[in-house]
Amino acid sequence: MSFPALRDKMQQFVAIVMKDPAVNNAVGFAGGQGSSNTGRMFVVLKPPSERKATADDIINRLRGKLSVVPGATLFLTATQDLNIGGRFANAQFQYTIQSEDLQELNYWAPRILAKFRTLTDLRDANSDQQDKGLAAEVVVDRDTASRLGISAAQVDAALYASFGQAQVSTMYLPLNQYHVVMEVDPKLLPGTDALRNTYVKSSTGQEVPLASFARYQPTNTSLQVNHQGFYPAVTISFNLGPGVPLGNAATVVEGAMRDLGVPASVHGSFQGTAAAFKDSAQSQPWLILAALVTVYIVLGMLYESVIHPITILSTLPSAGVGAILAIMLTHNDLNVIAIIGIILLIGIVKKNAILMIDFAVNASRQESKTPEDAIFQACMLRFRPIMMTTMAALLGGLPLAIGGGTGSELRRPLGIAIVGGLIVSQALTLYTTPVVYLYLDRIRLRVANWRAFHRKSPLPTPAGD
């Protein structure tokens, strides 16, 4: 649409958003991002202490109110404190469709968008494909124009002078200079009246009306053709439904592409935040495995054993389960910040077992105590330092979990993961670590006796000697 029409739509959107009780201020800008038919709006919410709803809740309740404005759509997305991917779009996540054939891309992109809008896990599905721009197509009858002494270059010059903002002169003043631009009367621009009143000078110097040798009709045209790499591309943006994780949405999107039967020449891929999520989801298990192997090697070198490091690592599953349960109970997402908290638990939680196992191993080797007596004495003597260090870490993460203020939404999953993991691991590892230590120590003794028995057994005599 035109800039004046877009400005009116933006004013309607701002008025609707400002009526929400959680909104402090809103400002809209018509035009921008390389196109005059798009705009942007910035909404400032009231402090969390003055509102009960989160940013996502406010977006969900505004979505229905904003749909009453005809001819335009406002897509809202919460500003991310931690941006990953850095790709601009009308929604938080993007899925890009590419093809070598532009016509094939224009055929499938609207159908894929329509399919995405039927998925219950997605919200605000939209596309950057703008191929419905309104244009006036001028078709020149060249035979008639030739008889009137008018060439194609003269028609082009007349149209450019009327609608191309041609500079015709420069006004020089003592302190400044101004460019004189020729254009059609602005009152005639919204319709096709300007074409009816356009005249072309023929080779004889006579002014000939454009309508006498040309016809014009409204048609659709592409405002822009986006590319990614070397190929045309259409990006479909979407938000997630309430409580829907990104992993489930990615699975649903890929399933929708298979159900549509999209040909192999049209291929899609996630971009921006969604692409970073898929990359991290693929590499994250290997990174965690590498971290566990590194910890195992270091502990094995410390205790000169291949069994005792397993006892220490046995405390980690309870911490991970506690962190995930805490995140689920508080209705938070397992985002990057929460994963950082789980990784921190690997270093925090295993110190409980280290304190006990280190004392039990020294007591067994230096004081010749049985494994039962050694681990029992370790539990009795190391209970106080275990509780002190755990409470110090737990209370240190508690302000992150229950704190408020600006930016608390970013820090809260980190504190919840740490606090939940420490509570569950502390309640379990004080009882499970001694049991795991005793069972693994029995396995160690059996393996040692089996090796000693085979070293003492005589070698078999070859047959025939």
Image: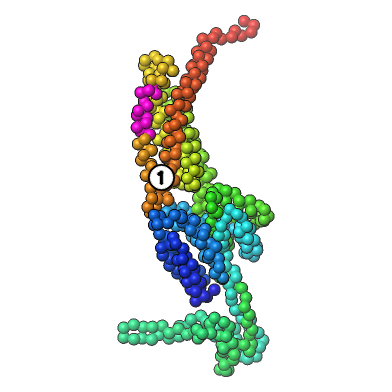
Q: Looking at the rendering, which quadrant does residue 153 occupy?
A: bottom right
Position in image of residue 105 (x %, y %): 62, 62
Rendered view: 100 above or below 408: below
* Magenta stretch: includes residue 386: yes
Residue 33, visible in the rendered structure: no
Residue 266, visible in the rendered structure: yes
**Residue beneath the point at 44% across and 60% down:** 22
Q: Quadrant of the C terminus?
A: top right
Element type where label 1 sits in the image: helix
Q: How many marks?
A: 1
> From this viewpoint, which residue is outermost toward the top?
465
**Residue beneath the point at 48% across and 47% down:** 332
**Residue beneath the point at 55% across and 68% down:** 68
Prevailing secondary structure class for the magenta stretch in the rendered image: helix
> From this viewpoint, which residue is outermost toward the left?
174
**Image coloring type:** rainbow
Position in image of residue 27 (x %, y %): 43, 67
Rendered view: 426 above or below 13: above
**Residue beneath the point at 59% across and 58% down:** 97
Q: Quadrant of the N terminus?
A: bottom right
Q: Amino acid at mark 1?
A: Ala
* Magenta stretch: includes residue 42: no
As rendered, which of 179 and 217 lies closer to the eye? 217
As rendered, which of 311 and 463 lies closer to the eye? 311
Relative to 222, 448 lies left or right: left
Position in image of residue 424 (x %, y %): 45, 35
Neighbourhood count class around disc 1 (C-alpha, 10 Å): few under 14, some 14–19, many 20 upward: many
Relative to 397, 72 lies left or right: right
As rendered, which of 74 and 19 lies closer to the eye? 19
Tell me the magenta residue range. 378-390
Q: Which residue is mark 1?
A: 401
